[in-house]
Amino acid sequence: MEQNTLGILLSYYRTKYKLSMEQVIDGICSTSTLHRIENGGREVDSLVGETLLGRIGKKANEFEMMLGDEDYVCWQVRRNLLKAMKQKDYEEAKKEIAIYRDMSVELPDVHRQFYLYYEGIIAIHEDESTEKIWEIFSEAFHCTKKELNPRQLYSPLEMNIALKLIHFRYPAWKNDYRKIIDRLLFVAQHYYTGEEKESMQAEIWMELIYLTEEQETGKVLMTYIDRAIDALANGRRMKYMGELHFRKARLIEECYHKTEEWSTQETECKRECLMAYYVFEVMRKEKEQKETQEFCEEKLGWHITEQEKLFD
């Protein structure tokens, strides 16, 4: 992608979505820099360009935006880091992070944010303290976000960092968890497209479910689970569908078993169990599949493999 193409895309989508320059560049670059980019008069490194596009839910081939030798070397280190993370080779990932840390001293803060995010992921896998995890992800978030603002846009990486802070209940955000999640969901729904939208919505909805479970029970929680199922059912990703259906089945049993309404709710409970069971089978999640089967036998007195008409 040529630099003037990057500027054209940024200008087009900013205008289309009625976004201010400040919303797009917040913590990344100055408004004068974005103005020059949009007018084809300023070059930026590939990660800065990718982050700017990410703020409006767009994605480009990073390699196509490469400027020169230094940018290429940074890209190569990022690629090596991502490869090590995918293979769960955390010692190798740490080596790449150390290289990147030294290289990025004089580079824009989006580079520090990038490697800090993966430092945080490694800290989670190595069972570091919650305080350590807060520290890493908080530093990563504040590389580009100096304060919380209800009109903020978020790049995919910023979204994931915010979700990690909420997941680990970052105390500084204690009164803002719901507002932040609502904003993340709005950004994903209105500016993201395709696979990026599906993936991000799934992560946000699950975090919203976990948060709601701490504050609500019964039918209120059921409403959120139904909304999550509806939101994710139209996509191709099945990552959380089994978990959602099983959560709903357990909630139905909890709310209605041994009540007068159980006679009408029992079939719905079994239907949700069956959906969960077969999604887990497709996803090859044997442990979760077994848990679903045991729930049916222990709570419902029903063998899930029995042939029974549950779907009209």
Image (cartoon, helix red, strand yellow):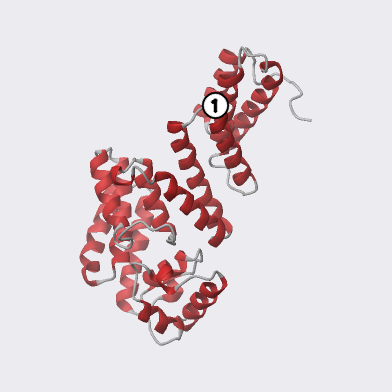
With 262 as the anchor, is 222 left or right in this view? left
Q: Quadrant of residue 100?
A: bottom left
Q: Position of residue 224 (x, y in %)?
A: 56, 38
Q: Amino acid at mark 1?
A: Gly
With 174 as the anchor, is 186 left or right in this view? right
Q: Position of residue 286 (x, y in %)?
A: 52, 29
Q: Is residue 92 visible?
A: no
Q: Is residue 222 visible?
A: yes
Vertical order, 311 against 26 (above or below): above
With 132 as the anchor, is 45 left or right in this view? right
**Which residue is painted at 44% across and 37% down in the image?**
211
Vertical order, 150 against 246 (above or below): below
Quadrant location of the C terminus?
A: top right
Q: Position of residue 255 (x, y in %)?
A: 57, 21
Q: How many marks?
A: 1
Vertical order, 222 against 140 (above or below): above
Q: Mark 1 falls on what kind of element? A: helix
Of residues 46 and 148, the one nearer the viewer is 148
User: Would you call the spot at circle 1 few (<14 residues within 10 Å), some (14-19), or many (20 or more)?
Assistant: few
**Which residue is painted at 38% across and 84% down in the image?**
42
Of residues 142 and 113, the one nearer the viewer is 142
Identify residue for label 1.
218
**Which residue is painted at 58% across and 38% down in the image?**
241
Q: Residue furthest right?
A: 312
